[in-house]
Image (cartoon, rainbow, N blue to C red):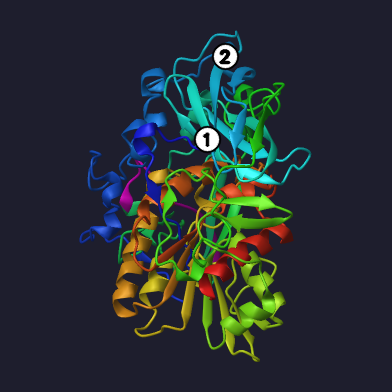
């Protein structure tokens, strides 16, 4: 679905990346000569007043850089800006009171279906502003996973326009779910606007002179002196990461990172009245007659033989909204609207990848790809440090028959799984270390889940730096294939991933940053996972196979 305004309906781009081994630097901030990178003065805080000796405060929600890509959230400023408390429940959006209207009930094949949402509060009054997060799909009758995702345009006045392509003959059933009212989204934004996660501590065990000490780590410590921290930021581009100096007052390169849950139980879902399942959170709009009839006689859909092969596309042009349909879920498969794709075939894929090196970097969902390919190709695999029970361990695999090398690297900080920081390289550094003229490399990356609860400007800085490294790599090796894998929709809620709205927000930023990036293919998976009603943030085998089938379609002829 779409939550972008009418003014922002432009095509976008998606991508996927793989990584190589690299390093993590640790330098204590000197008392006298501090570099600009170590002062945490990247674009993130360029408009924030602060002294050189103290970490500056983060910009507020409506002063942040990420907000420019979300006009519907900007429009909420007059209603929520400066508020310390949220409106009472009777004034927030109610799924049970909200009205869906379908002006036209009969269409031709390949027409664009249109409907409208009129948001109402719990008192039955029309909402005067937008920002609600809806998920909408059009499905075949009695087939909960055969259908298309629908885009939703926020008109900023409490109404929303639904649209989606009609690609089958017969009946279409419209399904609308209110994931979060705008008031709940504001609570989620407040709970993800810092350098430290609310309710979670990332701590490093450091060894100094044979003694172990525990210390807190984060993207910064606003209001605290910079002399009291160890700087583990990326010296090349300023990607920030800091740990408080331990009692020994010394910094160490030997860091074992781990996650600790704090005692604050309210952080998981913000203000609890706004996150009650079936009332104000993930509520299906149960309205009768939400159907449409699709007749033959129109032009045929172009998602079949008329489309170019995915491997022939030099660039994938996408809408800025991840919910706009990029394909049809049908019979446990996926038919792309972008290009002619084909199902995953391990033998054909392995033959296509002969003498290639596949580098995947990201979190545990990317390691799922690595493990799936290792199994599908019958490859040998072994670790490069740590234990295989944790995703935060580098792995390398090899299939002898076709001489295929597969590598997995966990991304740099933050990470919620225990492990040594030195085996978690920054994605940008990994790209920088790829030598020239390595045209046999396929590089795929994904990043986001472990940054859900931090200020989005930090994520925006991270992916902008990744794009800069991608551009540098293509100047050295213009034929390397680079992919950005989009984050997927899910309904699982944990302390670390309270809502997939965080992933949606990051997908919007990914599409913006990698728009028109030469030599990069963006793999759109949000609408695929939404239509298939994916629940876990670690997708099951069926969805993994569909995702890898789309990757194979872009890689192989």
Q: Position of residue 105 (x, y in %)?
A: 62, 26
In the rendered picture of this protein, how many numbered marks are placed on residues?
2
Q: Position of residue 33 (x, y in %)?
A: 20, 61
User: Looking at the image, which residue sits at the far front?
Assistant: 297
Query: From this viewpoint, is residue 341 visible?
Result: yes
Q: Residue 105, relative to residue 336: is it above or below?
A: above
Front-most of 285 and 196?
285
Of the image marks 1 and 2, the number of the one nearer the N terminus:
2
Q: Position of residue 93 (x, y in %)?
A: 57, 19
At horizontal 58% and vertical 59% (from top left) the residue drawn is 304
Q: Nearer the viewer, mark 1 or mark 2?
A: 1
Which label was assigned to residue 121?
A: 2
Q: Circles 1 and 2: CB distance less than 8 Å?
A: no
Front-most of 473 and 381?
473
- Asked if residue 224 lies in the magenta stretch, the reply is yes
At horizontal 59% and vertical 9% (from top left) the residue drawn is 124
* Magenta region: 211-226
Does residue 32 appear to the left or right of 544 in the view shown? Answer: left
Q: Residue 335, relative to residue 121: is it above or below?
A: below
Badge 1: how crowded within 10 Å, few (<14), some, or many (20+)? many
Which label was assigned to residue 460?
A: none
Secondary element at tag 2: strand
Residue labelled with disc 1:
163
Does residue 423 appear to the left or right of 391 in the view shown? Answer: left
Q: Position of residue 378 (x, y in %)?
A: 71, 82
Q: Residue 222, relative to residue 275: is it above or below?
A: below
Q: Quadrant of residue 79?
A: top left
At horizontal 46% and vertical 43% (from top left) the residue drawn is 321
Secondary element at tag 1: strand
At horizontal 54% and vertical 12% (from top left) the residue drawn is 91
């Amino acid at each position: 679905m779409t939550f972008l305004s009418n003014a922002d309906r432009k095509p976008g781009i998606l991508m996927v990346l793989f990584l190589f081994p690299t390093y993590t630097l640790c330098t204590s901030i000197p008392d006298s000569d501090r570099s600009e990178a170590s002062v945490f003065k990247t674009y993130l805080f360029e408009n924030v007043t602060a002294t050189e000796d103290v970490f500056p405060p983060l910009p507020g929600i409506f002063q942040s850089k990420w907000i420019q890509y979300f006009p519907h959230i900007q429009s909420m400023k007059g209603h929520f800006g400066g508020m310390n408390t949220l409106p009472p429940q009777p004034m927030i959006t109610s799924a049970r009171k909200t009205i869906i209207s379908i002006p036209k009930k009969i269409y031709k094949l390949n027409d664009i279906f249109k409907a409208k949402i009129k948001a109402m509060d719990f008192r039955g009054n029309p909402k005067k502003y937008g920002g609600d997060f809806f998920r909408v799909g059009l499905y075949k009758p009695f087939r909960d996973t055969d259908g298309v995702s629908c885009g939703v345009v926020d008109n900023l006045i409490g109404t929303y326009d639904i649209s989606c392509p009609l690609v089958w003959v017969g009946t279409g059933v419209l399904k609308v779910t209110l994931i979060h009212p705008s008031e709940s989204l504001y609570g989620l934004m407040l709970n993800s606007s810092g350098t430290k996660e609310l309710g979670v501590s990332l701590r490093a065990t450091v060894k100094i002179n044979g003694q172990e000490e525990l210390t807190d780590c984060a993207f910064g410590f606003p209001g605290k002196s910079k002399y009291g921290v160890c700087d583990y930021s990326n010296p090349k581009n300023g990607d920030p990461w800091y740990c408080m100096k331990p009692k020994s007052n010394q910094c160490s390169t030997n860091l074992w990172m781990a996650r600790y849950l704090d005692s604050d139980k309210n952080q998981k879902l913000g203000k609890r009245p706004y996150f009650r399942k079936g009332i104000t959170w993930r509520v299906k709009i149960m309205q009768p007659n939400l159907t449409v009839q699709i007749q033959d006689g129109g032009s045929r859909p172009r998602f079949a033989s008329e489309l170019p092969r995915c491997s022939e596309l030099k660039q994938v042009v996408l809408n800025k909204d991840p919910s706009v349909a990029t394909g049809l879920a049908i019979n446990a498969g996926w038919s792309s609207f972008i290009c002619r794709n084909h199902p995953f075939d391990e033998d054909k894929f392995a033959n296509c990848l002969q003498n290639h090196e596949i580098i995947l970097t990201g979190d545990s969902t990317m390691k799922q790809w690595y493990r799936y390919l290792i199994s599908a190709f019958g490859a040998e695999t072994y670790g490069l440090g740590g234990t295989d029970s944790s995703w935060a361990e580098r792995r390398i695999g090899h299939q002898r028959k076709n001489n295929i090398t597969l590598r997995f690297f966990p991304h740099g900080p933050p990470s919620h799984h225990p492990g040594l920081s030195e085996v978690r390289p920054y994605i940008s550094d990994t790209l920088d270390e790829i030598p020239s003229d390595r045209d046999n490399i396929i590089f795929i990356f994904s990043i986001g889940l472990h940054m859900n609860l931090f200020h989005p400007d930090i994520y925006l800085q991270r992916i902008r730096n990744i794009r800069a490294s991608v551009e540098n790599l293509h100047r050295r090796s213009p034929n390397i294939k680079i992919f950005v894998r989009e984050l997927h929709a899910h309904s699982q809620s944990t302390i670390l991933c309270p809502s997939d709205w965080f992933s949606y927000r990051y997908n919007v930023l990914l599409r913006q940053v990698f728009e028109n990036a030469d030599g990069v293919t963006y793999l759109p998976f949000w609408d695929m996972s939404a239509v298939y009603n994916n629940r876990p943030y670690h997708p099951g085998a069926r969805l993994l196979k569909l995702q890898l089938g789309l990757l194979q379609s872009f890689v192989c002829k």
